Amino acid sequence: MADNSTTAILVVEFQKTWTERSFFHGLIKKEYELKNVYQNTKQLLEVARKNGLKIIQSPFILDKNDKERYKKIPFLPKLFGQFTANTWRAEYTEGIFDKSDIEVKGRTGFDNTKGSNLQNILKENKIEKIYFIGFTTDHCVAETMDTLLSNGYGCILVSDCTATRNSKLQQKIENKYLSIESKQIIEKIANLV
């Protein structure tokens, strides 16, 4: 039988840049609202925390004061000024982060493993299976899943807790990976204890 202690939820960039009034929000707004991503994610995280799953938050933070790391960050996020440290754009969306969550540090790429301590976090916590939520499905989420799948982790996309520019692109990614809806996970993890 599976064990909640070896399962984690990786929350990719659930930050105000994606969920509030920014240019990036405009890119995913239709899918984000249509699929009820915020409410699904909030409910999933609440149940997961109660049932002993580790929640790993992987924000994207652009900090010009960290010159070495900043140089390695892709051009596009810098161009649009999104995820800027010490601004609302880098903040977690209200109700998504909890002080018990583990935070990924040092990210420099769309792939959440680039420059970060994510793989160390997974090893230290003996994580074997990872549910992916966040933004965007076809970019940061998919790139990170590819890396972690190639390193032997069980990776599962949570379809109604992710969003991208349109439903066709979302469906393409859902078909590429093992995919599940949040209500199915809630039933699974609640029954594992």
Image (cartoon, grey):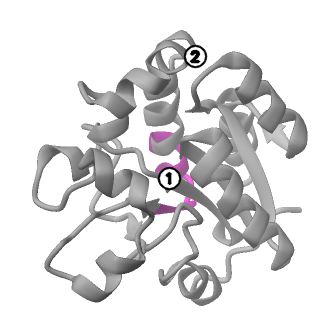
Q: Position of residue 19 (x, y in %)?
A: 34, 30
Q: Considering depth in this image, is 127 or 35 the residue closer to the camera?
A: 35
Vertical order, 70 against 27 (above or below): below
Give coordinates of residue 4: x percent, y percent.
68, 62
Q: On the image, which quarter does residue 59 sit in?
A: bottom left
Q: Is residue 62 left or right of residue 181?
A: left
Task: Name which residue lies at 79% across and 25% down.
Answer: 171
Q: Label 1 is placed on what type of residue?
A: Val
Residue bearing mark 1: 11
Q: Residue at position x 58%, y 16% from top? A: 35
The one nearer the camera, 9 or 34, is: 34
Position above or below: 111 against 72: above
Could you tell me if residue 91 is visible in this image?
Answer: no
Magenta segment range?
A: 46-56
Q: Which residue is mark 2?
A: 35
Which residue is found at the position 42% from the left and 73% from the top? 104
Instruction: Give the structural element (helix, strand or loop) at label 1.
Output: strand
Q: CA distance from mark 1 to mark 2?
A: 17 Å
